[in-house]
Image (spheres, helix red, strand yellow):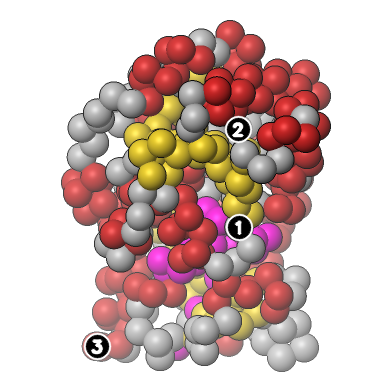
Amino acid sequence: MRILVDAFTKKNLGDDLFLKILFDRYPSEIQWIVLCDSEEQLSAFQAYRNVRMFQQKKDRYTDMDAVINIGGSIFMQNRFWWIRHLLYRLSYAIPMKWQRKPLFIVGCNYGPSNSKWMYLLNKWFIRYFVSDICFRDKKSYHLFRDLKQSRYSPDIVYGLDVHPIRHGHRDKHKAGICIMHFSDEVINRQWVNKMTALIERLCSENETVELFSFCREQKDLETYQQMMEKLGPSYENKIKLAVYDGRINDFLLELNSVGYLITLRFHSLVLAHVLRLSYYPIVYSNKTSHVLDDLGIQEYTHIKDIGRLDIDRVLHQIKQARDFPIHRIKAEAEHQFKTIDRFLFDFYTRGFKVESQ
């Protein structure tokens, strides 16, 4: 069996975790053909002999048995780029529809978007070309709940097996901070100012600090340099930097070593839950606030309010015990793959293929 995979392949930890969970879930007999620009973008999966990039001169969409579009914010408006994304999906969706082969979308949220045309055209696309779509937040699901293809389950990464990782060393006096770059210069400056103030406070209390970059390509390190310039040379030996480079397990072990975490990127929050880390969430997107709302978590700070962040309150909150139902959420997250599971079971046992709706 050959399955085409459409995913974000820019060495972003969250998206690579999506792919790892997908590839590990199913038999090695499946050939995963990933749409990407180079084999180097799949460096995290070099050990997987059944994973390779889609080759324009060698591969055809019509040779695939199914398509899986896996990702989080895959329905963003981003000016008129959403039109390009829709046309790109149609390039493989139309051959799948013609051959009555399935197209699955898993792990996604919808938006941010305020375009009615974007909503209507994507709804048309899902209705007529998608066999199953599973959203990771209830607000996105409710936008499409009248479609029979539409479902909801928690984020895929909640299903990550971290049992070996959680046995690693954890330093209760070590603070982790997830970093990222904001294109809005005012917000980026306010965030840098507040995090450097937090770092100065932590160091004054003899806490150690480690900064975590989940995606080098999205300019995380620019923000790191701005933070270090503001802190000055005296802090160079006091702060450690961990940059995700495709070695998933090494990065997760490092993340697990902190006693508590300031989360920012979406999957830094999810991993705090999965690793059972104490944390304080800073929210930069509705995709995060929607998930926090789904989980009934109300204590967080939106990035637009970062200038008013009370460091004393954060340090108090972050060390409070949290009762998080990780076992229940993990089981629910497995349902992201429910329809794919059924398709593969039918394919291997009876040769039956789920048809596009």
Identify which residue is drawn at 71% across, 75% down.
40
Q: Which residues are magenta?
A: 1-22
Q: Which mark is residue 178?
A: none
User: Which residue is label 1 attached to?
Assistant: 244
Rendering coords of residue 134 (x, y %): 39, 51
- The disc, 3 or 2, on the residue closer to the chain's N-terminal end is 2
When the figure is inspected, residue 89 is found, relative to residue 190, above or below; the finding is below
Amino acid type of the residue that numbered disc 1 sits on in the rendered structure: Tyr
Mark 3 touching mark 2, by CB under 8 A?
no
- The disc, 1 or 2, on the residue closer to the chain's N-terminal end is 2
Which is more toward the observer, 247 or 185?
247
Rendering coords of residue 129 (x, y %): 52, 60
Mark 1 touching mark 3, by CB under 8 A?
no
Rendering coords of residue 12 (x, y %): 61, 56
Identify which residue is drawn at 19% across, 46% down.
328
Rendering coords of residue 284 (x, y %): 58, 28
Q: Is any part of residue 305 visible from this angle?
A: yes
Q: How many marks?
A: 3
Q: Is 17 in the magenta?
A: yes
Name the quadrant containing residue 347.
Answer: bottom left
Q: CA distance from mark 1 to mark 3?
A: 39 Å
Identify which residue is drawn at 41% across, 66% down.
21
Amino acid type of the residue that numbered disc 2 sits on in the rendered structure: Pro
Under circle 1, the secondary element is loop
User: Which residue is label 2 attached to?
Assistant: 112
Name the quadrant containing residue 219.
Answer: top right
When the figure is inspected, residue 102 is found, relative to residue 18, above or below; the finding is below
Q: CA distance from mark 3 to mark 2?
A: 41 Å
Under circle 3, the secondary element is helix
Q: Which mark is residue 349?
A: 3
